[in-house]
Image: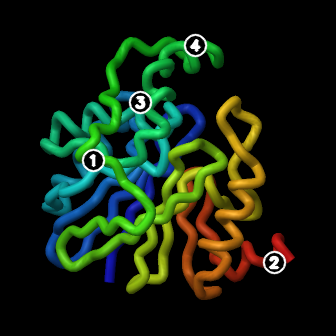
Amino acid sequence: MINIKCFEFNFLPVNTYVIWDDTLECAIIDPGCFYKKEYDELAGFIEDNQLKVKHLLNTHLHFDHILGNTFVEETYGVRARGNDLDNPWIIYMAERMAEIGIRYEGHINPIEPANVLHEGDKVTFGKTVLDVLQIPGHSPGSVVFLCKENRSVFTGDVLFNCGIGRSDFHDSDGKALIEGIVSKLLTLPNDTVVYPGHGPATTIGNERKYFI
């Protein structure tokens, strides 16, 4: 059984998840920390609960989901894991943030070859296993993390409560997004809890109703 803590970070806001089991080993998914108080909140939670950070996982590399990557990497000695098809979003991150009026002068490391996640990979920590599913469309490198034992899935911006991710970016593919959701997510048990990148949690059973 895993424990799940959700934080809402930054100006959009983004759901950042800390997940752990009784070994106290944990993974951080999509650290969206932007303000100092958000860094402090995340670090304080990890310290207060005596958690040991084993993984930094990115569902995709849009800037709102990776703003805290450098903090997590430097604080806990881990390197981000995700799919490198989204690395161009890091290269042009400052420009894309400037388009919405946000000045950014920080640095985010691209996903290194050794840390690239693909369909069928497994991420393990403590007694927990997360299966990696690739579902491109919102971004080329979008992945989700499925915990079969706990019947929970962390979907980033692929699937939301009563909605799906945007597909109007220059590198998006709406058809691929729908196909991936239908073939890889809607085939999961109805009571699988969906933890999205924005907004409240939902279930596969609830979301299946919108695809009939």
Can you say whether 162 is above or below 141 in the image? below
Residue that badge 1 annotates: 115
Residue that badge 3 annotates: 34
Q: Report the Cα–Cα distance between label 1 and label 4.
A: 29 Å
Residue type at mark 3 is Phe
Upstream in sequence: badge 4 or badge 2:
4
Residue type at mark 4 is Ala
* Residues under numbered marks 4 and 2 in contact, where contact means CB atoms less than 8 Å apart: no
Direction right: furthest residue:
212
Q: Is residue 177 left or right of residue 198?
A: right
Camera-near label (1 vs 2) is 1
Q: Report the Cα–Cα distance between label 3 and label 2.
A: 35 Å
Upstream in sequence: badge 3 or badge 1:
3
Residue that badge 4 annotates: 98
Upstream in sequence: badge 3 or badge 2:
3
Q: Is residue 36 left or right of residue 137?
A: left
Camera-near label (3 vs 2) is 2
Q: Report the Cα–Cα distance between label 1 and label 2.
A: 36 Å
Q: Report the Cα–Cα distance between label 4 and label 3.
A: 15 Å
The residue located at (18%, 66%) in the rendering is 25
The residue located at (28%, 31%) in the rendering is 70
Can you say whether 36 is above or below 166 in the image? above
Residue that badge 2 annotates: 209
Give the secondary structure at mark 1: helix
